[in-house]
Amino acid sequence: MKASAFAYARASSVANALELLVAHGDRAKILSGGQSLLPAMNLRLVSPDVLVDISDIAELRGITLKPDVLRIGALTRHVDILSSHEVASRAPLLVEAVAQVAHPAIRNRGTLGGNLAHADPASELPACMLALNATIVVRGPAGERRIVANDFFKGIYETALSPVELVTAVEVPVLPANAMHFFYEFARRRGDYAIAGLAAQAVLEGSRLADLRLVFFAVGDRPILARASEKLINIDVTASVLAEASTSLGEELNPHDDQQASAGMRRHLAKVLLARCVSGLLGQADPPMEELA
Amino acid sequence: MTVPVQLSLHVNGERVDTDVLPRVSLADFLRDYLKLTGTHLGCEHGVCGACTVRVNGEIVRSCLVLAVQVDQASVDTIEGLSDSGELSDLQAAFRDRNALQCGFCTPGMLIAAQDLLKHNPEPDRELIREHLSGNYCRCTGYHAIVDAVEMTARRRIERAQ
């Protein structure tokens, strides 16, 4: 199908983009990479009257390494993240996750800012932001806001952004030297929407996990930072410890039924991901399947 | 919404100056305005890959790019890449290995395959499948396509030696 008609404006700066958003209100939409917006428009799920193209705004580009954060500009394309030495060294979780985002042609256009603002519950990047405890930097007519990832994603396609704000950058805190990560998503084929996924960051001290952030995606209306991780830190993770964490996870999650999977299947897959993650982080072999029941 | 926007770009090496309504996708611009109908529309939401073209050397979904977004850009379609000979060994391999039947997916497949071989001259079958996972084929069952890409990679390496 074809998108319905709209007017088009190229913003020359963030201030100019904000002017346009304020002038048109919720009749306007930001056009970044367009890889989520344009499909929605072609399917007539959304019909903005005005598109504000931000791709000329230099300030939104670039990946910079600062002493305490890795700053990634909102216009950074997925393909740029894949090829960035800075991201590979400071946030390798992102590199692994982005490789699972759609397909090469999509990754050549899609942007980090656009992906986060779109907030698809099955998307990899919002989950990574939570796992990395990243801050989403946002600007509106009232000025700049820094929103921690956990407060940014509110629901299906819903974020803390107001209609007159745009994402300008993401700041990822520097990880400790003994940080480890885990990423896996179940999908029918590489690049398909995730059926269930896990993005995790951990700190390993000896044979124990000193810190663990488990973020499940595609199992709810937003990425979920699982409280079940509390059962796994500063403790020797035996089969029964893992089983307890797994039960706790099952109770904590409230996945949905859809054409891809039932709630029960998603809950099961989340537990499988938990087990694989823990054994991966602790350098153990995968636990036998029976233990996951 | 009915005000056309000025557009100036290169398509297959030729300069194009025109104006176009914002709503027109790059795919529709190529097909309807420039009569370059080798670029096909399958799904118009980015999953099938039939619309794949090259913009500034990188493959994109032309159904998910507005024509107005490629002002000042350089676009290569299957027509240009075929005429220049860049794809001739891939095309020959596709023909030899029966990697096309109806041909609808083929322009996108060729462009995606060429993109893979540019980035990775010696891909294994797993990597070929992965890179082409965004291009759907309803006819061949994919094996012959993977064969053709693998064969082309091997032949290019042999020729280079």
Image (spheres, grey):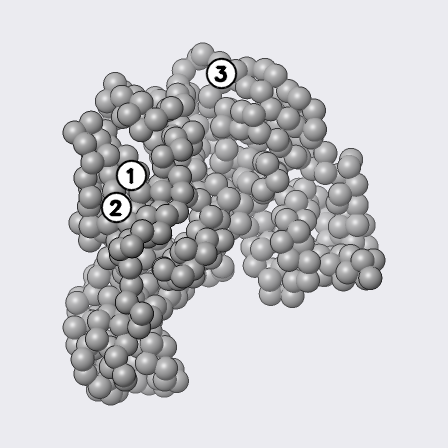
Q: Chain of mark 2?
A: A
- The CA distance from mark 1 to mark 2 is 7 Å
User: Would residue A101 be seen by someone viewing this image from the given angle?
Assistant: no
Q: Upstream in the sequence, badge 1 or badge 2?
A: 2
* Within-10-Å neighbours for mark 3: few <14, some 14–19, many 20+: some
Instruction: Residue B20: give x, y in percent of width and height.
Output: 53, 17
Q: Is residue A19 visible?
A: yes
Classed neighbour count for the residue bearing mark 2: other residues with Cα under 10 Å, few (<14), some (14–19), many (≥20): many
Q: Residues within 10 Å of mark 1 (few under 14, many from 20)?
A: many
Circles 3 and 1: CB atoms closer than 8 Å: no
Residue at horizontal 65 percent and vertical 34 percent from the top: B76
- Amino acid type for the residue under numbered disc 3: Val
Element type where label 2 sits in the image: strand
Residue holding disc 1: A167
The quadrant holding residue A161 is top left
Give residue A247's position: percent from left, percent from top: 20, 76
Instruction: Provide the residue designation for mark 2.
Output: A136
**Which amino acid type corresponds to the residue marked 2 in the rendered image?**
Ile
Same chain letter for marks 1 and 2: yes
Q: Which mark is residue B5?
A: 3
User: Furthest-top residue in view?
Assistant: B3
Residue visible at 59% across and 15% down in the picture: B18
In this view of the protein, which residue sits in the foreground, A257 or A183?
A183
In the image, residue A180 lies at what x, y percent? 33, 70
Picture residue at 30% right of the left edge, 47% below the top: A170
